[in-house]
Amino acid sequence: MKEAKARVARVRKLIARAMTTPRHDPVYQACERIFHREAELVLGRENPQRKVLRTKALRRFLQGYPPRKRNDTSMGDAFNWEWMIYCAAARKADLVIISRDADYGVAIDKRCHLNDHLRQEFRERVSSRRKVILFNRLTEGLKYFNVNVSKQAVDAETAWIRAEFSGSAPEVLPEQGPPTE
Protein backbone atom coordinates (compact mmCIF):
# COMPACT_ATOMS: atom_id res chain seq x y z
CA MET A 1 0.00 0.00 0.00
CA LYS A 2 2.89 2.32 0.84
CA GLU A 3 4.49 1.64 -2.55
CA ALA A 4 1.22 2.33 -4.40
CA LYS A 5 0.75 5.60 -2.50
CA ALA A 6 4.33 6.60 -3.31
CA ARG A 7 3.78 5.89 -7.01
CA VAL A 8 0.53 7.87 -7.07
CA ALA A 9 2.28 10.77 -5.35
CA ARG A 10 5.11 10.62 -7.91
CA VAL A 11 2.67 10.58 -10.85
CA ARG A 12 0.73 13.50 -9.34
CA LYS A 13 3.96 15.43 -8.96
CA LEU A 14 4.92 14.73 -12.60
CA ILE A 15 1.48 15.78 -13.84
CA ALA A 16 1.55 18.98 -11.78
CA ARG A 17 5.03 19.76 -13.09
CA ALA A 18 3.94 19.14 -16.69
CA MET A 19 0.91 21.39 -16.20
CA THR A 20 2.82 24.27 -14.61
CA THR A 21 5.97 24.00 -16.73
CA PRO A 22 5.14 21.90 -19.78
CA ARG A 23 8.69 22.10 -21.14
CA HIS A 24 9.49 19.18 -18.80
CA ASP A 25 6.78 16.97 -20.30
CA PRO A 26 8.16 14.49 -22.89
CA VAL A 27 4.99 14.72 -25.03
CA TYR A 28 5.24 18.51 -25.04
CA GLN A 29 8.94 18.27 -25.96
CA ALA A 30 8.14 15.96 -28.89
CA CYS A 31 5.41 18.30 -30.13
CA GLU A 32 7.76 21.26 -29.87
CA ARG A 33 10.32 19.46 -32.04
CA ILE A 34 7.68 18.64 -34.65
CA PHE A 35 5.66 21.86 -34.79
CA HIS A 36 8.17 24.57 -33.97
CA ARG A 37 10.83 24.03 -36.53
CA GLU A 38 11.39 25.67 -39.85
CA ALA A 39 9.90 23.36 -42.46
CA GLU A 40 7.76 23.71 -45.54
CA LEU A 41 4.82 21.83 -44.06
CA VAL A 42 4.80 23.51 -40.65
CA LEU A 43 2.26 26.30 -40.61
CA GLY A 44 3.64 28.99 -38.30
CA ARG A 45 2.24 32.45 -37.66
CA GLU A 46 4.85 33.97 -39.97
CA ASN A 47 3.78 31.87 -42.95
CA PRO A 48 1.92 34.14 -45.42
CA GLN A 49 -0.07 31.11 -46.63
CA ARG A 50 -1.87 31.10 -43.26
CA LYS A 51 -4.01 34.11 -44.18
CA VAL A 52 -4.92 32.64 -47.57
CA LEU A 53 -5.94 29.38 -45.90
CA ARG A 54 -7.94 31.21 -43.25
CA THR A 55 -9.89 33.07 -45.95
CA LYS A 56 -10.59 29.85 -47.86
CA ALA A 57 -11.61 28.09 -44.65
CA LEU A 58 -13.97 30.91 -43.69
CA ARG A 59 -15.60 30.85 -47.13
CA ARG A 60 -15.94 27.06 -46.93
CA PHE A 61 -17.42 27.29 -43.43
CA LEU A 62 -19.94 30.01 -44.37
CA GLN A 63 -21.07 28.03 -47.42
CA GLY A 64 -21.63 24.97 -45.23
CA TYR A 65 -19.21 22.73 -47.11
CA PRO A 66 -17.73 19.71 -45.38
CA PRO A 67 -15.92 18.96 -43.26
CA ARG A 68 -18.20 20.43 -40.62
CA LYS A 69 -21.01 19.56 -38.28
CA ARG A 70 -24.50 20.88 -38.95
CA ASN A 71 -24.63 23.36 -36.06
CA ASP A 72 -20.90 23.94 -35.73
CA THR A 73 -19.67 27.39 -34.79
CA SER A 74 -16.00 26.64 -35.36
CA MET A 75 -14.17 26.57 -38.68
CA GLY A 76 -11.34 24.36 -37.38
CA ASP A 77 -12.17 21.39 -39.62
CA ALA A 78 -12.42 23.70 -42.64
CA PHE A 79 -9.01 25.19 -41.86
CA ASN A 80 -7.46 21.74 -41.38
CA TRP A 81 -8.92 20.56 -44.71
CA GLU A 82 -7.59 23.60 -46.56
CA TRP A 83 -4.14 23.01 -45.06
CA MET A 84 -4.22 19.32 -46.01
CA ILE A 85 -5.23 20.19 -49.59
CA TYR A 86 -2.45 22.78 -49.78
CA CYS A 87 0.19 20.33 -48.50
CA ALA A 88 -0.92 17.48 -50.80
CA ALA A 89 -0.89 19.79 -53.83
CA ALA A 90 2.44 21.41 -52.91
CA ARG A 91 4.12 18.04 -52.39
CA LYS A 92 2.24 16.27 -55.19
CA ALA A 93 1.46 13.64 -52.58
CA ASP A 94 -1.27 11.30 -51.43
CA LEU A 95 -3.20 12.29 -48.33
CA VAL A 96 -3.83 10.07 -45.33
CA ILE A 97 -6.37 11.31 -42.80
CA ILE A 98 -6.68 9.68 -39.39
CA SER A 99 -9.84 10.83 -37.65
CA ARG A 100 -12.87 9.39 -35.91
CA ASP A 101 -14.65 12.65 -36.71
CA ALA A 102 -17.66 11.79 -38.88
CA ASP A 103 -17.19 15.15 -40.65
CA TYR A 104 -14.58 13.49 -42.88
CA GLY A 105 -16.41 10.25 -43.54
CA VAL A 106 -17.96 7.15 -42.04
CA ALA A 107 -16.99 3.60 -41.14
CA ILE A 108 -19.28 0.95 -42.61
CA ASP A 109 -18.58 -2.78 -42.45
CA LYS A 110 -15.14 -2.14 -40.97
CA ARG A 111 -14.12 0.13 -43.86
CA CYS A 112 -13.67 3.89 -43.78
CA HIS A 113 -15.29 5.88 -46.56
CA LEU A 114 -14.33 9.49 -47.17
CA ASN A 115 -17.12 11.99 -47.70
CA ASP A 116 -17.90 12.08 -51.46
CA HIS A 117 -17.74 15.88 -51.61
CA LEU A 118 -14.25 15.85 -50.04
CA ARG A 119 -13.06 13.07 -52.38
CA GLN A 120 -14.24 14.96 -55.46
CA GLU A 121 -12.73 18.21 -54.23
CA PHE A 122 -9.41 16.48 -53.56
CA ARG A 123 -9.34 15.14 -57.12
CA GLU A 124 -10.14 18.56 -58.57
CA ARG A 125 -7.74 20.59 -56.44
CA VAL A 126 -4.85 18.15 -55.99
CA SER A 127 -4.92 15.41 -58.63
CA SER A 128 -7.09 12.58 -59.82
CA ARG A 129 -3.98 10.37 -59.71
CA ARG A 130 -3.35 11.00 -56.02
CA LYS A 131 -5.06 8.99 -53.30
CA VAL A 132 -6.85 10.29 -50.25
CA ILE A 133 -7.31 7.63 -47.59
CA LEU A 134 -9.30 7.81 -44.37
CA PHE A 135 -8.56 5.78 -41.24
CA ASN A 136 -10.39 6.04 -37.96
CA ARG A 137 -7.66 4.41 -35.90
CA LEU A 138 -4.14 5.68 -35.42
CA THR A 139 -2.75 2.15 -35.27
CA GLU A 140 -4.20 1.36 -38.71
CA GLY A 141 -2.77 4.58 -40.12
CA LEU A 142 0.65 3.69 -38.74
CA LYS A 143 0.42 0.21 -40.27
CA TYR A 144 -0.34 1.82 -43.64
CA PHE A 145 3.05 3.54 -43.35
CA ASN A 146 4.70 0.20 -42.50
CA VAL A 147 5.27 1.16 -38.87
CA ASN A 148 5.35 -1.88 -36.61
CA VAL A 149 2.39 -1.66 -34.25
CA SER A 150 2.26 -4.01 -31.29
CA LYS A 151 -0.83 -5.98 -30.40
CA GLN A 152 -0.69 -4.20 -27.06
CA ALA A 153 -1.00 -0.81 -28.82
CA VAL A 154 -3.93 -2.04 -30.93
CA ASP A 155 -5.65 -3.46 -27.84
CA ALA A 156 -5.07 -0.24 -25.89
CA GLU A 157 -6.55 1.86 -28.70
CA THR A 158 -9.54 -0.49 -29.00
CA ALA A 159 -10.16 -0.30 -25.25
CA TRP A 160 -9.91 3.48 -25.31
CA ILE A 161 -12.37 3.74 -28.21
CA ARG A 162 -14.82 1.39 -26.51
CA ALA A 163 -14.64 3.48 -23.34
CA GLU A 164 -15.05 6.72 -25.31
CA PHE A 165 -18.10 5.44 -27.18
CA SER A 166 -19.61 3.28 -24.45
CA GLY A 167 -22.76 5.40 -24.40
CA SER A 168 -23.28 5.02 -28.15
CA ALA A 169 -25.30 2.46 -30.01
CA PRO A 170 -23.14 -0.44 -31.28
CA GLU A 171 -23.57 0.54 -34.93
CA VAL A 172 -22.05 3.97 -34.20
CA LEU A 173 -18.84 2.52 -32.77
CA PRO A 174 -15.91 3.18 -35.08
CA GLU A 175 -14.67 0.17 -36.95
CA GLN A 176 -11.59 -0.22 -39.08
CA GLY A 177 -10.68 -2.29 -42.06
CA PRO A 178 -8.67 -1.84 -45.21
CA PRO A 179 -8.60 1.73 -46.47
CA THR A 180 -10.78 2.91 -49.28
CA GLU A 181 -9.74 5.46 -51.81
Image: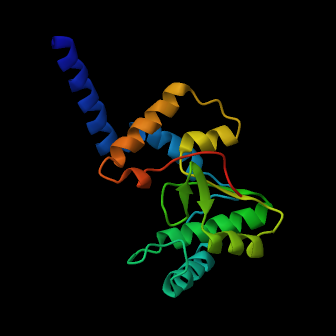
* Furthest-right residue in this view: 129
Image quarter hosting the N terminus: top left
Foreground of the two, 95 or 80: 95
Quarter of the figure with residue 150:
top right
Can residue 36 be spotted in the picture?
no
* Identity of the residue drawn at 49% across and 86% down: 62
Foreground of the two, 92 or 120: 120
How is colour applied across the structure in the image? rainbow
* Furthest-left residue in this view: 1
Q: In the visual, does 29 lie left or right of 48?
A: left
Q: In the visual, does 126 lie left or right of 139?
A: right
Can residue 153 be spotted in the picture?
yes
The mark tally for this picture is 0
Q: Is residue 67 above or below residue 156?
A: below
* Identity of the residue drawn at 62% across and 71% down: 82
Q: Is residue 158 above or below residue 1?
A: below
* Identity of the residue drawn at 70% across and 63% down: 87
* Identity of the residue drawn at 57% across and 63% down: 44
Q: In the visual, does 93 lie left or right of 112?
A: right
**Relative image position of residue 53 (x, y in whole percent):** 60, 75
**Relative image position of residue 75 (x, y in whole percent):** 47, 75
Image quarter hosting the C terminus: bottom right
Quarter of the figure with residue 148:
top right
**Relative image position of residue 123 (x, y in whole percent):** 76, 71
Foreground of the two, 148 or 120: 120
**Relative image position of residue 99 (x, y in whole percent):** 53, 55
